[in-house]
Image (spheres, coloured by chain):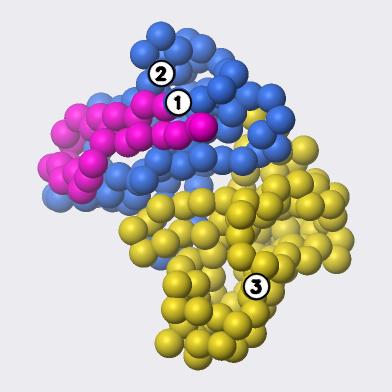
Chain colours: A yellow, B blue
Amino acid sequence: DTAVSQTPKYLVTQMGNDKSIKCEQNLGHDTMYWYKQDSKKFLKIMFSYNNKELIINETVPNRFSPKSPDKAHLNLHINSLELGDSAVYFCASSPFSGGETDTQYFGPGTRLTVL
Amino acid sequence: GNSVTQMEGPVTLSEEAFLTINCTYTATGYPSLFWYVQYPGEGLQLLLKATKADDKGSNKGFEATYRKETTSFHLEKGSVQVSDSAVYFCALIAGGTSYGKLTFGQGTILTVHP
């Protein structure tokens, strides 16, 4: 029944490591997103994909590389992790092309802690 | 650029009190406006939305009216419950080619005591 799922839920790793977070949606939506929530709860969009095509790339360091193997999946790979990458990462999806009336549905989040 | 400003929290209320969380925005074009709620340890859920001026969004006893003249979208509930304790986010998607880029306010923590 899970609409937007993410794995893992928690990720603890050392500085300098490379890690991936996976996201899957079973809603048949066309557009998927990654958001970062910092320690003060502030949320900011990182990327969005529409039918596997990158649409939004919000000035994110190129250590972050999203990959969309198909329109139901959007993974986030992070190279050379830094302390400042510690945050909660949310995946979301929306039915259409992400226009202003397109409701986004969020996953449960992945809490990344970099030591 | 686009931005959303919410009232500073945290907000602490007693059960059955009236709730208002203020939200104002700056945006190009005619944005759609949203309130999302994040319960402890969970992801965000859409609470309500309004896509044009004077629209009222409502859900679970919460309401917000899209006021273009004051660029506001204040969240209200007549009688809060302990289960409403959460973080509330006001957000917008600007009109035109924003491709679903949600711009969020800073969030307001609400705590309701019995």
Report which residue position mark 3 lands on.
A63
Q: Chain of mark 2?
A: B
SS class, disc 1: strand
- Distance of mark 2 from mark 1, alpha carbons? 7 Å
Report which residue position mark 1 lands on.
B26
The 10 Å Cα crowd at callout 2, few under 14, some 14 to 19, many 20 or more, is: some
Q: Is the residue B15 above or below the residue B56 in the image? A: below
SS class, disc 2: loop
Q: Which amino acid type is marked by label 1?
A: Thr
Left or right: where does residue A55 sit relative to residue B14? right
The label on residue A17 is none
Which stretch appears magenta? B1-25
Q: Which amino acid type is marked by label 2?
A: Thr
Tell if the residue under mark 2 belongs to the same chain as the one under mark 1: yes
The label on residue B71 is 2
The residue nearer to you, when weighing A22 against A81, is A81
Q: Chain of mark 1?
A: B
SS class, disc 3: loop
Residue occupying the point 45% across, 12% down: B68
Residue B35 percent coordinates (x, y): 45, 36
Q: Earlier in the sequence, mark 2 or mark 1?
A: 1
- Distance of mark 2 from mark 3, alpha carbons? 37 Å
The residue nearer to you, when weighing A89 against B112, is A89
Q: Nearer the viewer, mark 1 or mark 3?
A: 3
Magenta span has A115?
A: no
Tell me whether the residue at label 2 lies in contact with that at label 3, contact meaning CB atoms closer than 8 angstroms.
no
Magenta span has B6?
A: yes
